[in-house]
Every structure is written in structure tokens, then in C-alpha cells.
């Protein structure tokens, strides 16, 4: 969330440099730029995905949006800071108060670089209002931000700005400009949220950015948000007004009367881009977050936790939450930096994701990825994921072509020579590279000083594989690699690690 470049410039200047990232041609044609259609994919940072009207839509930072019919080829709907943006509406119109607090050169807390900052939107259909709602943040510094929202009759906008929801980064001079004063007097706010020096206590309280909104199984409306600073917070919203329902203070359970409940993190360690998805079939609320710094070599990555309730305790595979230090060991790491057969340039900084369950029950994760090509160019990626026997997400290795993860998989098709990568749990720029494993018909595994076992649960598509001392549980699927070659893949999770395997039509191992 710390790159501030107009998205149109970013798309035109950096996207060709990413063209060699895989077997497909990612670069836009001249005709494509003129018509708003970019071959294969288009730049959209922090993409939030939603299905509507028989299409898919992504909304991203810097007022970008695009649509697709197949989750691979995207048509640009809007991008950049200008008053004619047909998706966001004219949020620069005089008297709208969008940037009163943060996000512009004229804000109460002005932007450092004298430009506009509108980041990380999320769009949801609100049945109570009968409208689409877009939540997004305007921000001036690394912790002075606010989250606001607009409504529209169409998923494509324009979204009419309504109000601000929550503020962060205020100090003793600006605290009176926030609506925190509605819940306590100014003296209490200063003593509660500010340091002795009169500055915002960012290690304990959140940066009000990266909002994601969702309805739970009982129809309650929630917003999860936050980046670094005091961690990830959850606030309930009123579905009739879109505004916050501020809770009663409960310090023992990390509930603040203004910001809501802290779910994870704190002490200004890397954690951001939260997204909660309720999966009715699996029976879990999944909380996705990103660790690391979002630059190509900053170790950016996707982690996931889960809870049985929207405001419960979100835990990882080891039953742990993110503490206020040493977060690398916490959370199932779904994706980081990696390369695979058919990938020309390694994928880097795969993060800030959204997720959805489509009408046909297929599950998708959408995120932006950079490349190991010396630039900070980025593109959105959509992958399908399965849920293993224990209910943990397992992301398929390649961009989706809307393949079907089978309910049952013939174990006789599994033995052979596999390219395998382990995502590990590190937060660094290490690229996970493939090593060779042989899976034999007798259920054993060997390769590169490693050994183990594998099996497929009878009548299912669930794979269990041990590699060395670690056991993993996952799913099997047929799909195509980046070059369009048919492959068999597996994706499995264990000990907060994800392992991916790819097998081509090599002779089966004896």
C-alpha cells in the first residue's frame, strides 16, 4: 500500500516489462490500449473481486477497475485520479468532503507528495439497501487515514460518496476533526489513543486502510481493516446506513470502543490487506492477510487463518494467533515468491488478495503479483483453490482456466515424476524453486535426499503426502500450466506451509 503512482502511468510504463513472466503474452497491444482491453491481464493493485451480472469485476487502488468474463482477460473500466472516473464518480467535486481529513494536498493532514491517495477498495452487494457499496480509504501518511464509502445501483458505478467510517493517525491538534469525539470527550481520546508526546499511538491502534466488508451467516454486516501499526481490526457496520456500530470496550478481549476488535497483529509488524470470506460449505470464516513489504523483493505473501465465528479467535494450522512479534511462524502461507515449469520469470510479492465462492461452488483467490525482472510492474492473478480434508485452503499452482477440482481422483494416475515447490514460512525474497520427487505406486516418495509416503483417500480427491518429517493434506486436479500444457497438480498444506506439485505426461514411476 505504499506505492503512489497514477495507475494509468503504471500500466503503460511497467506492464510491457512483465510480458515475459509466463508462456502467455501479457503485454498490451496498441489496439488494446485504445479500446481499454488489455491482452490477458491489466494492472490493478490490491484487487478486490466480485461476481455480478454474469461477469467478474476487480477494483483496485488508484481508482482502478476492470471486468472479465473468464477471470483471465480484463477490460479496463477506470483508472487514475480524475473527476470523470465513471466508477468512483466525481469524488473531487466541491462540497463532498471526501478528502477533508486525509488523501489530498488540501486535507487537514495533507499528503506528503502533494498528490491524491485513494487505496484498496472493496465492493459488496447490500440486500438491505438494494445497492452495491464500495468501501475504500483515503490516506495522507503511513498512518493518517480514514475509511469511507459510496453506494451505487450498478456494480460498475458511479458510486455516490456517503460518509467516513473511521479515522486514524490523529494527534493532539487534529483529534477534534475525527468522529471519535462522539464516543468520549476529547481529553479521554487524547489520553487513550495518543502517546505522552501527543502523537498517535500507532503500535497499539490501527491504520484505517485496506477495508474489506462482508455479511456473515446471520446477516450481520462487518468490516475488517488495518495495515501494520496496531494490527488488523474488525468493526460491525449497520447495513441500513453503512456506518460503524461501535462496541462496548472490552480490553480483556482486545475490543476498543472506537476501532473495534483487534483480530491479529500489532506493534507495527508487517500485516495488512485483510479479507474475510465466509465459506458456508466448509463452515469456516477465513481471514486472509499479507505479510512483508509489497515491493518485488520485500517478501510480500498471503497467509490465512480461520474461525467458526466472524468476530472469534482466528487461528492457524497450529491453533495459534499472530502475536505482537515474530509473526513469521503464524498463519498458513499460501503463496510467496516462486517459479514453476513453464514460468519464464519468477512470480514475486504475491499478495493483497481477495477471495470468493462462485455460483457454481468454485473458490477463487485474486491478488496482484510482481515479477523477478528488475521492475515493480504488477498484474492481477486469479487462482482456484480447494479445501483439504481438514478445511484448509489449498491454492492451485497456475492461473485459473475455470478447471474443476474433482470430488474423486484415481490413485493410479498419481505415480510419476513431480516438480514440487515448498512455499516455506519465511518473510524474505527467497524464490521457491522446484525440486524432483518420485511418487511410486506402492505409496512411497523419494527424491533429492528426501523420502516419505503418499495416499489418496478412497473415493475422494484428497491427497496426503509426507515429505521428510512433515505431513501435508491437499487436493489433486487437472489443469494447464502457463504455456497451456495439460498437467496434473496437487496443492497441500501442513505445518503452516504450502507445497505444490506438477506432473507432466512422464512415464509412471515403477
Image: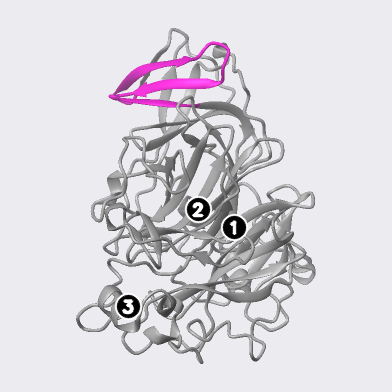
Q: Are marks 3 and 1 in contact (CB under 8 Å)?
A: no
Q: Residue at x 65, y 63 (%)?
A: 133
> Element type at marker 2?
strand
Inter-mark Cα distance, 3 to 2: 28 Å
Q: Are marks 1 and 2 in contact (CB under 8 Å)?
A: yes
Q: Which residues are magenta?
A: 447-474
- The percent coordinates of residue 154 (x first, y second) are 77, 63
- The percent coordinates of residue 334 (x first, y second) are 44, 42
Whether residue 340 appears in this view of the structure is no
Callout 3 environment at 10 Å: few (<14), some (14 to 19), or many (20+)?
A: some
Instruction: Give the image quarter of residue 438.
Output: top left
> On screen, 418 above or below 83?
above
Is residue 394 rendered magenta in the image? Answer: no
Q: Residue at x 41, y 24 (%)?
A: 437
- Front residue of 162/450: it is 162
Q: Which residue is mark 2?
A: 275
Outermost residue, left side: 196
Q: Which residue is mark 3?
A: 189
> Element type at marker 1?
strand
Q: Which residue is mark 1?
A: 48
> Element type at marker 3?
helix
Amino acid at each position: 500500500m505504499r506505492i503512489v503512482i497514477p495507475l494509468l502511468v503504471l500500466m503503460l510504463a511497467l506492464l510491457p516489462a512483465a510480458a515475459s513472466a509466463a508462456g502467455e503474452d501479457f503485454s498490451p497491444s496498441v489496439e488494446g490500449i485504445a479500446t481499454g482491453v488489455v491482452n490477458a491481464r491489466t494492472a490493478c493493485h490490491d484487487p478486490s473481486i466480485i461476481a455480478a451480472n454474469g461477469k467478474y469485476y476487480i477494483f483496485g487502488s488508484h481508482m482502478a477497475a476492470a471486468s472479465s468474463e473468464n477471470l483471465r482477460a480484463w477490460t479496463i473500466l477506470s483508472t487514475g485520479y480524475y473527476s470523470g472516473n465513471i466508477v468512483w464518480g466525481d469524488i473531487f467535486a466541491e462540497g463532498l468532503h471526501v478528502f477533508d481529513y486525509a488523501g489530498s494536498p488540501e486535507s487537514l493532514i495533507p499528503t506528503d507528495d502533494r498528490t491524491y491517495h485513494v487505496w484498496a477498495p472493496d465492493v459488496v452487494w447490500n440486500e438491505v439497501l438494494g445497492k452495491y457499496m464500495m468501501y475504500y480509504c483515503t490516506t495522507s501518511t503511513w498512518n493518517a487515514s480514514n475509511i469511507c464509502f459510496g453506494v451505487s445501483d450498478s456494480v460498475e458505478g458511479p458510486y455516490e460518496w456517503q460518509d467516513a467510517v473511521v479515522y486514524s493517525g490523529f494527534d493532539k491538534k487534529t483529534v477534534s476533526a475525527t468522529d471519535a469525539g462522539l464516543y468520549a470527550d476529547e481529553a479521554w481520546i487524547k489520553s487513550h489513543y495518543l502517546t505522552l508526546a501527543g502523537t498517535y499511538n500507532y503500535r497499539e491502534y490501527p491504520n484505517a486502510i485496506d477495508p474489506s466488508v462482508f455479511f456473515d451467516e446471520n446477516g450481520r454486516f462487518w468490516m475488517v481493516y488495518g495495515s501494520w501499526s496496531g494490527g488488523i481490526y474488525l468493526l460491525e457496520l449497520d447495513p441500513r446506513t453503512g456506518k460503524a456500530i461501535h462496541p462496548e470496550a472490552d480490553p480483556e478481549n482486545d475490543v476498543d470502543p472506537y476501532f473495534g476488535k483487534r483480530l491479529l497483529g500489532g506493534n507495527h509488524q508487517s500485516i495488512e490487506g485483510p479479507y474475510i470470506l465466509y465459506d458456508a460449505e466448509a463452515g469456516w470464516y477465513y481471514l486472509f492477510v499479507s505479510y512483508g513489504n509489497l515491493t518485488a523483493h520485500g517478501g510480500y505473501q498471503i497467509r490465512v487463518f480461520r474461525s467458526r465465528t466472524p468476530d472469534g479467535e482466528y487461528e492457524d494450522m497450529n491453533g495459534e494467533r499472530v502475536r505482537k512479534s515474530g509473526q513469521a511462524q503464524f498463519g498458513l502461507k499460501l503463496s510467496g515468491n516462486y517459479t514453476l515449469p513453464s514460468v519464464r520469470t519468477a512470480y514475486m510479492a504475491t499478495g493483497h488478495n481477495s477471495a470468493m465462492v462462485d455460483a457454481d461452488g468454485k473458490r477463487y483467490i485474486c491478488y496482484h503479483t510482481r515479477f523477478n525482472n528488475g521492475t515493480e510492474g504488477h498484474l492481477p492473478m486469479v487462482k482456484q483453490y480447494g479445501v483439504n480434508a481438514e478445511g484448509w485452503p489449498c491454492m492451485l499452482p497456475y492461473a485459473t482456466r475455470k478447471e474443476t477440482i474433482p470430488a474423486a481422483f484415481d490413485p493410479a494416475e498419481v505415480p510419476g515424476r513431480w516438480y514440487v515447490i515448498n512455499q516455506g514460512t519465511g518473510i524474505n525474497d527467497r524464490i521457491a524453486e522446484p525440486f524432483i520427487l518420485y511418487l511410486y505406486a506402492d505409496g512411497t516418495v523419494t527424491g533429492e535426499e528426501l523420502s516419505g509416503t503418499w495416499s489418496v483417500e478412497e473415493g475422494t480427491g484428497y491427497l496426503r503426502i509426507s515429505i521428510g518429517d512433515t505431513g501435508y493434506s491437499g487436493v489433486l486436479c487437472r489443469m494447464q500450466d502457463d504455456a497451456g500444457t495439460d498437467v496434473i497438480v496437487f496443492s497441500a498444506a501442513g505445518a503452516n506451509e504450502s507445497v505444490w506439485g506438477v506432473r507432466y505426461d512422464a512415464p509412471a514411476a515403477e
